[in-house]
Amino acid sequence: MFEQAKYQYLKQTASSSFQPKAALIDMDGVLFDSMPHHAYCWTKLFRSLGFSFEEKEAYMHEGRTGKATLEILYRRELQRDPSDEEVKELYGRKAEMFDNMPAAPIMKDADALLDCIRDAGMQRILVTGSGQTKLFDRLNEAFPGHFNENSMVTAFDVKQGKPFPEPYLMGLKKAGVAANEAIVIENAPLGVQAGRAAGIFTIAVNTGLLEDEVLLDAGCNLLFHNMSELKAAWPEIIKAIQL
């Protein structure tokens, strides 16, 4: 399966080689089981505005910047864009709700997978659409030695978030590698689209409420159902890459 995915990627991208030196890793839903918290907060916020919104929809918007999510809902519900003041006020309310919730647990085996990636000699670059500082503060505590200020791309660093390729293109730049020298690890359809748009081999881990087909249709090269599954398969993935 892994060798087939590799050769399909080479064919799709017309790349002559695939030798990953960096893993570009999403945060919410990949490293932390934080998406239920985000979904709850977005749902509570939008319903307080009288908008029609279900928690499952939050998973479809996952990876967007907060500003982009607010713009989409305002256009749909009010047929206009939110003002800068509304974006600041509403995203501030959502962030405050999130910060007052219990700390999101670490995804099982996320730390072990990061160790496997490091042991394979690959850089670890965080690429997230989030601007929640509470989670950033936990990164070094939860995953010591894996991330620093120079190995992170956040909502504050990009003009166009996922599904646009800019976050992952910036991740490539921070790692100093080409698209065929990286792997994306994502859980969200918009993140998968962003990784593929950047020309990167993209692994999806379906840790949320969406059907597998949503991530497959977004264009992932491989699909797993949790981080433990991906961690168990990692040696075989590396072996296939090196062939």
Image (cartoon, grey):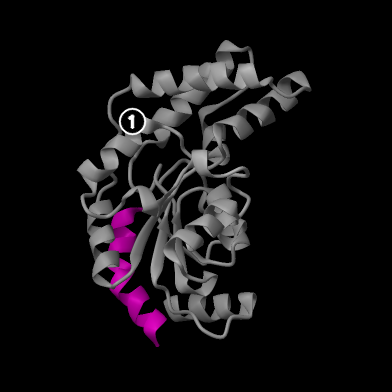
Across and down, in percent, residue 23 comes to 40, 63
Image quarter in which the N terminus is found: bottom left
The reply, left or right, for residue 129 in relation to residue 29 is: right
Mark 1: few, some, or many residues within 10 Å (few <14, many ≥20)? some
Asked if residue 60 lies in the magenta stretch, the reply is no
Q: Residue at x 60, y 22 (%)?
A: 87
Q: Quadrant of the C terminus?
A: bottom left
Q: Which residue is mark 1?
A: 134
| Image point (56%, 37%), residue name | 65
Image vertical order of residue 76 relative to residue 32, above or below: above
Magenta region, residue range: 226-243
Please tell me whether residue 238 belongs to the stretch shown in magenta.
yes
Q: Nearer the viewer, residue 232 or 72?
A: 72
x then y, percent, for residue 111: 24, 53
Residue 153 visible here: yes
Percent position of residue 35, x then y: 42, 36
Residue 55 vertical position relative to residue 1 in the rendered view, above or below = above
Q: How far across and how far down the image is residue 144, in percent?
A: 21, 50
Residue located 61% across and 12% down the image: 49
Amino acid at circle 1 = Lys
Q: Quadrant of residue 2?
A: bottom left
Residue 82 against residue 175 in the figure, above or below: above
